[in-house]
C-alpha cells in the first residue's frame, strides 16, 4: 500500500480521505481486542465529460466543469481475525474483529463493472481493493 501511495497521481486524480460519520459502535470483543480503524489510501478520479451538449457549448480553452468519474479504494486489514441524500451513497467497509467499520460518502451513480473499464475488487495479502468508474451515458435527443 505504501508503494501505491508513493506512486505519483495522474492529473485527473486526487487524494480522497473524507470519512462519513458512523454511529457509535460497541463490540462484544472489545475487551479482547482494541477496536481500531484499518489503514486506507483512496483516490477520486475526476475529469471532463465530453457529451454532445458539452461538445457544442465548450472547447479545450473553455472546458466544462469537472465531474467525479470514479473512485479507487485501497483498504488494508492487518492481523485479520442509510443515506438521506439520494445523490450520495455511503460505502461501508466491515471486516469484523478487531477492526472498526469505516465508511465513505460517494456520488450515487451506476458502476461500470467491466475489468476493461478499470473495475477491480479483490482481497489479497490483507489488502482489500475496490476500484470502479461510473457508467457514461451518451446524450441522445
Image (cartoon, rainbow, N blue to C red):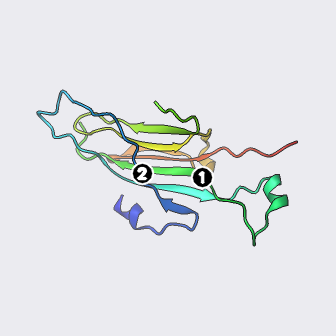
Q: Residue at x 88, y 42 (%)?
A: 141
For the residue pair 45 and 87, the one nearer the viewer reads as 87
Residue 26 relative to residue 41: left or right: left
Instruction: Please provide percent x and percent y for residue 113.
Output: 60, 41
The label shown at residue 18 is: 2
In this picture, residue 51 sits left or right of residue 132 = right
The crowding category of the residue bearing disc 2, from other C-alpha atoms within 10 Å (few below 14, some 14 to 19, many at least 20), is few
Q: Secondary structure at mark 1?
A: strand
Q: Which of the 4 image quadrants contains residue 102?
A: top left
- Image marks 2 and 1: residues in contact by CB distance under 8 Å: no
Q: Residue furthest front?
A: 84
**Which residue is at the far bottom?**
61
Which numbered disc flags the more N-terminal residue, 2 or 1? 2
Q: Residue at x 28, y 45 (%)?
A: 37
Helix, strand or loop at label 2? It is loop
Mark 2 → mark 1, Cα distance in angstroms:
14 Å
Q: Mark on residue 127?
A: none
Q: Quadrant of residue 25?
A: top left
Residue at which label 1 appears: 68
Picture coordinates of residue 86 (x, y %)?
Answer: 57, 34
Which residue is at a point 35% across and 37% down the rendered structure image? 22
Amino acid at each position: 500500500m505504501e508503494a501505491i501511495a508513493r506512486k505519483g497521481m495522474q492529473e485527473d486524480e486526487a487524494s480522497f480521505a473524507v470519512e462519513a460519520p458512523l454511529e457509535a459502535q460497541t463490540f462484544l470483543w472489545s475487551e479482547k481486542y482494541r477496536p481500531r480503524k484499518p489503514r486506507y489510501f483512496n483516490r477520486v478520479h475526476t475529469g471532463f465529460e465530453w457529451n454532445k451538449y458539452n461538445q457544442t457549448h465548450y472547447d479545450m480553452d473553455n472546458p466544462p466543469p469537472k465531474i467525479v468519474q470514479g473512485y479507487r479504494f485501497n483498504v488494508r486489514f492487518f492481523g485479520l481475525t442509510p443515506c438521506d441524500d439520494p445523490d450520495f451513497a455511503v460505502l461501508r467497509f466491515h471486516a469484523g474483529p478487531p477492526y472498526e467499520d469505516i465508511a465513505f460518502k460517494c456520488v450515487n451513480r451506476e458502476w461500470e463493472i467491466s475489468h476493461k473499464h478499470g473495475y477491480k475488487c479483490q482481497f489479497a495479502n490483507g489488502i482489500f481493493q475496490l476500484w470502479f468508474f461510473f457508467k457514461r451515458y451518451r446524450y441522445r435527443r
